[in-house]
Amino acid sequence: MRRLLAIQLFLGAIFSSPAIGQADDFGMPKENLPAPTSVQDVLTTNPIKLFVSADAPSSDLPTVGGSFGLDDAVKVGLKNNLTLKQSERAWTGSKFLARAALGKFGPSASFNTFYSTSSLNQMLFFPNDTTVASSPMQPIVRGTSLSLIFAGTQPLLTGGRLMGGYKAARALERQASSGYHADGNTTALKVKEAYWETAWYEARLRVDTDYAKTKEWSVSNMQARVEEGKAPRADLLREKAELARARTQVNDDYRDYNVALVKLKVALGINFSSLFFLKESLDYVEVAGDLSSYLTMAGKNRPELTQAESKVLELRARRMVARSKYAPQVNLYGLGSNITGSSPDGHADGRWGGVVGVVGGITLFDSGTRLNELRAASNTVKEAEIARQEVQQKVAEDVSIAWINLEIARKNVDLAKAEVVSAEEDQRLIHIRYLVGKSIELEDFESGVKLLQARLALLESIYKYRVAQARLQWASGML
């Protein structure tokens, strides 16, 4: 359905009243009335044209065109929105970190070189702090030596340290995934809000443009009536003032329309020079379901709930890591080396040797470091559990407020329709009275303005209803 609602709303009652017959307000045949403003008219007469040069910021963004339905716009936004792309990168990075944490369960190996010159035999603590190193202490003998060292290790017992680290990394991955989907939901909402805002300003622009056209025609006819002595000059001045006001409003509408287009392009993540028009009508569409059903959907679909739950799991895993410091740490250790030059026994020059062993240890005393780290970790778990409850409360609040706004918007649409019906009838009766000389031109003029305002108010109420609908869908986790 093409978007003819704006034109139908304004022109339907003014120019098709059976009581008026074949004449307009001033006795002019209907066939001489200006043609209704179309979407193409809005695009071609738009005084603002945005062009992005090759060296301008955002010039590398994709350019799109054609007609956009609401679902089409959401798809484009989910594909190109820059904030959502950043969130996707963060999610991808968290996957790699989770794999890195899993890799710590397996064996690892390294190659090291050690060159020393010493004036006496001594023992040196190995200075490098690497994932896999040679022996914790390196014997240094008098003279000069060069060692080539291959070392490997396999964790055997960590007291939950590695498992806790992996669970924490997986929980972070799930948080990043939930964050990405939450950003996707928010992106869809921003696209819908920007889409309906653009639709509203376009509809208002078309109505106000048609109104300005009728005022131009009215001024022309009133000028003729004044010259013929059939109307006072005050009526002509009033019509000219209204025409000036109508033209000013059209200019303001073009400003609002173009600003809304820019916001929509930002939400879509596309080039500012993109030219397209909206395919959806600014129509009233009834929403099914009650508050309870939307709350249930939010409990299943809102990614913020999963994100909060994953945060609790992450901190529980970090508490496991803190507790692991009370357990012994055991590793299978292997080393093979070649020494050239001086050696401890004096006979190893140029020879290869190796050792396999199990290295284990446990901390006996640390002045309360482990205890307080574990207490702090337990406290952060409780904090995360409270934060999870707060997120649940916030989700319920979002759904409830969105539902209230939708219900009020629905009632306002009904009230706006009643105002339009009343304004149409008033305008019809006053216009008939004016044609037969029972009403003055000012009353006829004011009835037309009142009808215009009522129809614009109806369009605005429908726009607010569609935005409220989009926000309820966001609150319930529906893209």
Image: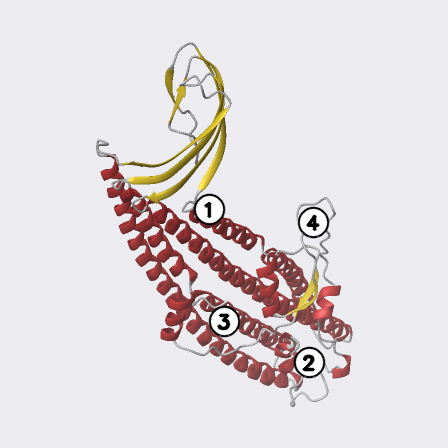
Residue 194 image offset from top left, x and y in percent = 57, 62
Callout in the foreground (4, 3):
4
Please tell me whether mark 4 sits on a helix, a strand or a loop.
loop
Q: CA distance from mark 1 to mark 3?
A: 49 Å
* Amino acid type shown at disc 3: Tyr
Residue at position x 42%, y 78% in the image: 289
Q: Earlier in the sequence, mark 1 or mark 4?
A: 4
* Amino acid type shown at disc 4: Ser
Q: Which mark is residue 465?
A: 3
Please tell me whether mark 1 sits on a helix, a strand or a loop.
helix
User: Mark 4 sits on what residue?
Assistant: 59
Q: Nearer the viewer, residue 173 or 412?
A: 173
- Say whether residue 316 is left or right of residue 57: left
Residue 202 image offset from top left, x and y in percent = 64, 67
User: Mark 2 sits on what residue?
Assistant: 25
Indicate the quadrant where residue 429 lies: bottom right
* Amino acid type shown at disc 2: Asp
Q: CA distance from mark 4 to mark 3?
A: 35 Å
Residue at position x 74%, y 48% in the image: 53
Q: Which mark is residue 100?
A: 1
Please tell me whether mark 3 sits on a helix, a strand or a loop.
helix
